Amino acid sequence: MRLVLTENLTPQMTLARNVYKMGCVYLKAGQRNISKYRERLEDLGVDYVYIHDEASEGIDIPEVVSEETRHKCQDALRTTFSTLENNMPIDVNMFKGPVNTLMAEIMNNSEVQVSLTDISSMDEYTFGHSVSTAVYSLIIGQELKLPKEQLQELAMGAILHDVGKVRLDSRVLFKETKLTDSEFEQIRKHPEYSFEILKYCRNMSNDAKMISFTHHERLDGSGYPRHLKGNQLGLFSRIVAVADVYDALSTNRCYRKAWPVNKVVDFLTKIAGTELDNELVAALIKKVAIFPNGTEVKLSDGSYAIVVSQNEQMPFRPVVRVVRDKDMNAVHPYGIDLMRDLNITIVASQMELEMEEEEQKKIIV
Ligand SMILES: [Fe+2]
């Protein structure tokens, strides 16, 4: 299995994972000749899909959380948002079941590195983002060895942290161009809206509720809405801040493309110690695959390879399978363990190469 750019789909490729739209399966895994759906997938805003082909035979992409559990959590969020849109009171109890399953899977897969690339469509962004934020928060919480009850509270607060976005104008929330100052002000109100919605909810601890209010605050006081700093920010707020930034940068947004994991990790490392908590950033980075299995990379000898498996001791040096030479011609595939062959390095990930191409196109235009 591997992840390919939708525009690079060929008739020989079979869909390896379901593609969803509004919570329903839009294309089912196993669909042959997936290239005939290319235009429809592009219209849907799906830039990447997981496929099976000869070049990626035998490559497994282990996931910390199953697709089914992610979608159960997203369903609960979809129901909550539509309840709020109809001005009805919400019941956070409905998250208990999905959150417990999420926790159980993360605990059972504690050895698995996160290689999640969310391919959900843009109209589902808030739901996908909320679930991923809960997943990353739990991974950090688990690294800190928090007790189960605390992990449960953390996950509840994290999954509902952006619920106030229901009160924002969707034209502003999904605007593709630069926001004006007043639009920015509107967006910045969502932590307060989230807290207003959650503050009277039963079955949710105060610490969990506070996450909604404080997840955009930063340790150095540069965040919003209250410019809180340092000790004013509790552990849950600090954890979800890291998880929120990590997911926001590593997924597609309406105004920019997803960043590759290595670039996200660089960025987080830069703001660790000032804006974000150093120890918590380190805890998350330890658990993510820098070059996830099934993604394409460019090697220092100019050739192109697919990542086959991880070397935990050296996250920047996985095992790869070379599939194209420097002139992009297909070659008979061969494997290299970059931990053993130290003369070769990864110079760019698939996403970086695509980003470079986009930049070049902009320059040419
Ligand atoms: Fe937020």
Image: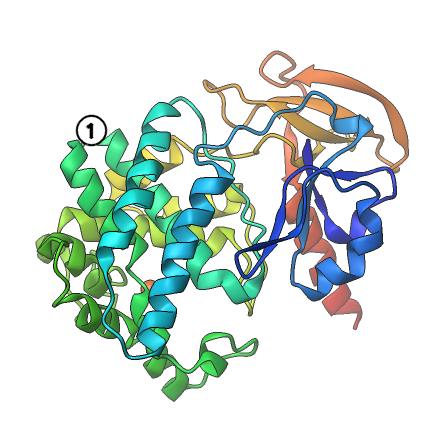
The vertical placement of 10 against 304, above or below, is: below
Q: Is residue 267 visible?
A: no
Q: Is residue 224 left or right of 350 when viewed as pictured?
A: left
Say which quarter of the image contains residue 303: top right
Q: Is residue 84 left or right of 16 when viewed as pictured?
A: left
Residue 67, percent from left and from top: 50, 41
Q: Amino acid at mark 1?
A: Lys
Cβ of mark 1 under 8 Å from ligand 1: the answer is no
Which residue is depicted at the point 20% across and 28% down? 145
Which residue is depicted at the point 55% across and 44% down? 117
Q: Which residue is mark 1?
A: 145
Q: Quadrant of the N terminus?
A: top right
The vertical placement of 83 against 304, above or below, is: below
Q: Quadrant of the C terminus?
A: bottom right
Q: Provide the secondary structure element on which disc 1 rests.
A: loop
Q: Is residue 7 visible?
A: yes
The vertical placement of 141 against 183, above or below, is: above
Give whichever of 119, 24 is nearer the camera.
24
Give whichever of 293, 49 is nearer the camera.
49
Give whichever of 353, 249 is nearer the camera.
249
Residue 325, percent from left and from top: 85, 30
